[in-house]
Image: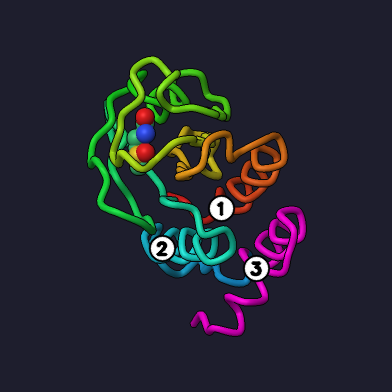
Amino acid sequence: MSSALEDTLWQTMSKSEKYDLVNQQLPTLLDNSVDDVANLANASALLKEAFGWWWVGFYRKQETALILGPFQGPMACTRIAYGKGVCGSCWKEEKTLVVPDVEEFPGHIACSAASKSEIVVPIWNARGDFWGVLDADSEHMAHFDDLDSSELELFCRTLSPYLS
Ligand code: SME
């Protein structure tokens, strides 16, 4: 659905303007009559289109591990254990983790050598159970800040009622 015109429009906007539009668009893409995969596929595409991050996608909790879900970007590792890497640490600590330099994060899991900084946001479903995480990676150092944290937390709260 993306056009060259839409790509150009995103490029003219500030980060805060992009988040305003992303968080307005997300509810229009979500559908309670389809499964998590369909909703999260469009949610990851929306973030990729708006921000052009190196990698963005979801990992879903399945028993004792996080399993790769819908994403945009290069191939990624399929399984992350509780407490491991940035994603597994986000699950353990149940809070957003902003990593300005992935080399400095003990146990960081390098799915791609190009990734330099990362943000991981925890997600709960409508029942209040931990569902999984949203993970975004950048090829630039220190790419994510407090604005990304608060806006992506809002993004994930909007997703919650649509997750099983
Ligand atoms: N870097 C993550 C692994 C997932 S990839 O970045 C897509 C981590 O340390 O958990």
The segment highlighted magenta reads: 1-26
Alpha carbons under labels 1 and 3: distance apart? 25 Å
Q: Quadrant of ligand 1?
A: top left
From the viewer's perspective, is residue 3 above or below residue 29?
below
Q: Where is residue 150 in the image (x, y as percent from the top left)?
A: 70, 39
Q: Residue 5 carries which label?
A: none
SS state under label 3: helix
Number of disc labels? 3
Identify the residue position indicated by label 1 in the image: 159
Q: Which amino acid does label 1 sit on?
A: Leu
> Which of the marked residues, 1 or 2, is nearer the chain's N terminus?
2
Identify the residue position indicated by label 2 in the image: 41
Q: What residue type is labelled 3?
A: Gln
From the viewer's perspective, is residue 62 above or below residue 42?
above
From the viewer's perspective, is residue 11 above or below residue 161?
below
SS state under label 2: helix
Q: Residue at x 31, y 38 (%)?
A: 113
- The answer to which of 59 and 62 lies nearer the viewer is 59
**8 inside magenta stretch:** yes
The reply to whether residue 60 is visible in this rendering is no
Crowding at dot 3, Cα within 10 Å, few <14 / some 14-19 / many 20+, comes out as some
Q: Where is residue 40 in the image (x, y as percent from the top left)?
A: 44, 58
Crowding at dot 2, Cα within 10 Å, few <14 / some 14-19 / many 20+, comes out as some
Judged left or right of residue 161, residue 39 is left
- Of circles 1 and 3, the one toward us is 3
- Of circles 1 and 2, the one toward us is 2
